[in-house]
């Protein structure tokens, strides 16, 4: 964009200026004329240097430099009115002193090459802090950030977290893809709604009983062997405990009556507690890659279930009660040891809701004639890679065989 084009866009009295996606290589110095400028967007350009004259915009409240090629920043201490600063997706290695930015509410420094954070204790009005996708090994003291609602420290090199007990306004906490072995005390975070700790090295969870407003809990890809009492998490809607070392679910899981999705794949589960019959709102249940020898009977009371994944276990039999799950859309039983195709499945296939019954890679040797009489259906019964020998001419279209 040339100088004339900039002049056409810029009006000395304007408070908002968006120069995003203009392929700029530098910030136009004409911006200096905009003494009333409050919102400046320069995202998705090729800017390498943030000039000092930006600091002479005393009313600036929001500065967006997302997705440029900036390597370093000047001293930002003059921008005391700044409320939002987005410098994500750049090449910044070090941050300047930010202590004067006391009105800052949103700070996004994600996707850079930052190894260490400056002191943030003066940013008492901060509500959102995203430092994800950097090279940070240690966090500074965050206890003064009592207004913080969102904290994202994912994809760094953290081995531990500081004390978070004073962050009582926190609603979302993301610490995934680090090297954390132990979580700090979370009992004061009573407003927390989302907690994501995936891909760490955590072996044990702290007490979660005070997190009564939690709606999403993702602890997958850790080394957890036992779950704490979950009974107080009465607002929990999504629970992901997959890829851990869990052998048993606590009875208290039955108190999660708002739970809609449970992912528990890749553990060592053999049974489900009877209390799971109370999970009447659940629509998706993933129990794949565990140690089940049968489909757990509490499942038959989960009448809102739409997706049931229990593939890659040691199941030998499909129970007749499976047809009581009248809202079932997808039933995945592939890679088990099922030998017999029960006629009761015909009822499921003829329903209008089921889309897929996956029985691939089992030990089925015969297809009862009732299945062969079914005419065209939009749904599918997949019985590939079993021990069946069928005449291709008698195979209905809905039946995936070869």
Image (tube, rainbow, N blue to C red):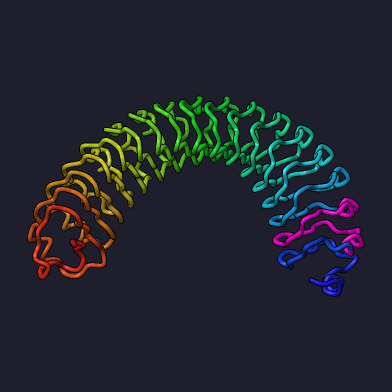
Residue 295 relative to residue 230: left or right: left
Residue 346 coordinates in the image, percent (x, y):
16, 58
Residue 341 relative to residue 263: left or right: left
Residue 234 relative to residue 254: left or right: right
Quarter of the figure that contains the C terminus? bottom left
Quadrant of res 269: top left
Q: Residue at x 84, y 39 (%)?
A: 100
Exactly how many numbered labels are in the figure? 0
Please report the bounds of the magenta region as a residue range.
30-58
Q: Is residue 44 magenta?
A: yes
Residue 147 coordinates in the image, percent (x, y):
70, 37
Looking at the picture, tell me which residue is in the foreground, 84 or 346. 84
Quadrant of res 156: top right
Residue 332 coordinates in the image, percent (x, y):
27, 50
Q: Residue at x 17, y 57 (%)?
A: 347
Q: Is residue 181 above or below residue 93?
A: above
Q: Residue at x 44, y 26 (%)?
A: 228
Q: Is residue 234 above or below residue 30?
A: above
Q: Residue at x 66, y 46 (%)?
A: 110
Examine the rendering and report whether any part of residue 345 can be seen. yes
Quarter of the figure that contains the N terminus? bottom right
Examine the rendering and report whether any part of residue 128 can be seen. no
Looking at the picture, tell me which residue is in the foreground, 182 or 212. 182
Q: Is residue 400 above or below residue 256?
A: below
Residue 190 coordinates in the image, percent (x, y):
58, 32
Quadrant of res 370: bottom left
Q: Is residue 147 magenta?
A: no
Residue 8 relative to residue 169: left or right: right
Looking at the picture, tell me which residue is in the foreground, 138 or 295. 138
């Amino acid at each position: 964009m040339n100088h004339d084009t900039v002049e056409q866009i810029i009006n000395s009295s304007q408070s908002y200026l968006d120069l995003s996606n203009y392929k700029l290589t530098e910030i136009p110095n004409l911006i200096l004329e905009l003494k009333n400028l409050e919102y400046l967007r320069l995202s998705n350009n090729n800017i390498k240097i943030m000039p000092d004259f930006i600091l002479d915009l005393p009313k600036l409240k929001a500065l967006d430099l997302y997705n440029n090629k900036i390597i370093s920043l000047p001293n930002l201490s003059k921008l005391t009115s700044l409320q939002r600063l987005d410098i994500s997706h750049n090449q910044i290695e070090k941050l300047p002193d930010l202590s004067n930015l006391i009105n800052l509410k949103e700070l996004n420094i994600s996707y850079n090459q930052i190894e260490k954070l400056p002191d943030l204790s003066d940013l008492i009005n901060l509500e959102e802090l995203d430092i994800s996708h950097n090279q940070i090994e240690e966090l500074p003291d965050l206890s003064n950030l009592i207004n913080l609602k969102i904290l994202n420290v994912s994809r760094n090199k953290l081995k531990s977290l500081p004390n978070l007990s004073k962050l009582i306004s926190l609603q979302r906490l993301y610490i995934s893809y680090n090297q954390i072995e132990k979580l700090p005390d979370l009992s004061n975070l009573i407003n927390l709604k989302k907690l994501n700790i995936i891909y760490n090295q955590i072996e044990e969870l702290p007490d979660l009983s005070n997190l009564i407003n939690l709606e999403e809990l993702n602890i997958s890809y850790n080394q957890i062997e036992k779950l704490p009492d979950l009974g107080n998490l009465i607002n929990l809607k999504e629970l992901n405990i997959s890829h851990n070392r869990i052998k048993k679910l606590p009875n208290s899981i039955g108190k999660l009556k708002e739970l809609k999705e449970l992912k528990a794949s890749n553990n060592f589960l053999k049974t489900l507690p009877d209390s799971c019959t109370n999970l009447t709102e659940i629509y998706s249940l993933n129990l794949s890659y565990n140690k089940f020898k049968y489909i757990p009977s509490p499942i038959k009371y989960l009448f809102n279930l739409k997706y049931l994944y229990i593939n890659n276990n040691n199941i030998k039999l499909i129970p007749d009660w499976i047809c009581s799950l009248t809202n079932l859309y997808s039933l995945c039983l592939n890679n088990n040891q099922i030998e017999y195709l029960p006629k009761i499945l015909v009822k499921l296939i003829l329903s209008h809701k089921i889309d897929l019954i996956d029985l691939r890679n089992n030990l089925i040797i015969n297809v009862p004639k009732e299945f062969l009489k079914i005419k065209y259906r939009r749904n599918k019964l997949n019985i590939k890679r079993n021990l069946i020998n069928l005449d291709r001419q008698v195979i209905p279209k809905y039946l995936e065989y070869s």
